Amino acid sequence: MTRSFEPVRVPPLAEQDGNTFGRLVEVMRALLSPDGCPWDREQTYETLRKYVMEEACEVIDAIDQGDRTALREELGDLLLQVVFQAELARTEGSFGPDDVVAGICEKLVRRHPHVFGEVQADDAEQVLRNWERIKKTEKASRKLLEGIPRSMPALVRAQRVGEKVHRVGFDWPDAAGSRAKVAEEIGELDCAIEQRDAAAVEEEFGDVLFAMVNLARHVGVDAEACLRRTTDKFMRRFEHVERMATEQHGGLTDERGGTLPLETLDVWWEQAKTMERS
């Protein structure tokens, strides 16, 4: 059976109000119908899990690149994952896409009493404190840190933990205390390395990373984004090293299969740094 599908009419930006959401639900239902797509019909929450993470990361990449065309596309891919799982839930009788939208709308109104109620909030910090207080009344049995997903990237998760406990006053008063904690943890890591205690090294290394993430929060930077940019920078510079090694030696190994001298690689590394700065 061949289905016909009329293209979605997209109104001018000033007139867009989200009414096209229903068309995506309609398409998803067609794909999951008995005569729909065999691959889509085989999917489960578990098989879709990896795509949720993948699409979210692609949204982040588009934001970092400042590419609005890519961002529009990637947001659509992420929205597909929301509708896909909501339709699976509707089929099994748990909830549906309208329940998802209604739930988030109600939550946003409830947690913004300074917009939809009589509460005053003079700055973003007060908004966040009110948000946490309202969440606590909504989920009285939930512990403060319970809502932070364990599957988050480790640096992001650590920073979110710091943000959460900061809102209830469990934090250094300023960056100086956080920086001193970094020095303390590095000292403990040095001791563990000197003692060649593998288990202690692993634990102390984690403590150093956690302390560094807290310092990042205190000085107003995103630890995950910082490390991502530094890794990108390292890769760009190493690509120059690899290119020079290929041009001059046929690759990163010598004729005997050994590695090239570090001194030689360092010369090209410094070249890459100079080229970036200029």
Image (tube, helix red, strand yellow):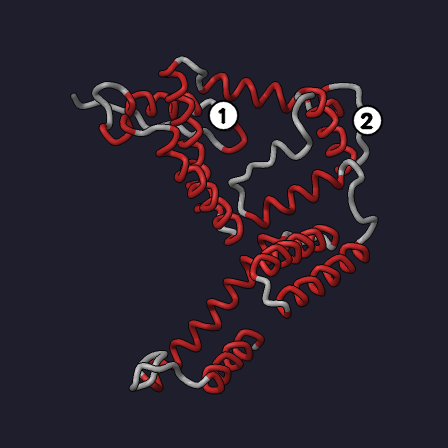
Q: For this view, does 231 lie left or right of residue 133?
A: left
> Where does the image place residue 108, in percent across and percent down from the top left?
63, 24
**Residue in the image at 55% along x and 39% along y:** 150
Disc 1 is placed on an element classified as loop
Q: Label 1: which residue?
A: 18
Circle 2 crowding by C-alpha within 10 Å: few under 14, some 14–19, many from 20 = few
Above or below for 189 versus 247: above
Disc 2 is placed on an element classified as loop
Quadrant hosting residue 219: bottom right
In front here: 43 or 69? 43
Quadrant hosting residue 119: top right
Residue 120 numbered tag: 2
Instruction: Tell which residue pokes out farthest to the left in this image.
Output: 1
In front here: 239 or 163? 163
The amino acid beneath tag 1 is Gly
**Residue in the image at 61% along x and 55% along y:** 203
Q: Nearer the viewer, mark 2 or mark 1?
A: 2
Q: Earlier in the sequence, mark 2 or mark 1?
A: 1
Instruction: Tell which residue pokes out farthest to the top in this image.
Output: 93
The amino acid beneath tag 2 is Gln
Above or below for 126 versus 238: above
**Residue in the image at 24% along x and 24% along y:** 36
In front here: 164 or 109? 164
Quadrant in which the N terminus is drawn: top left
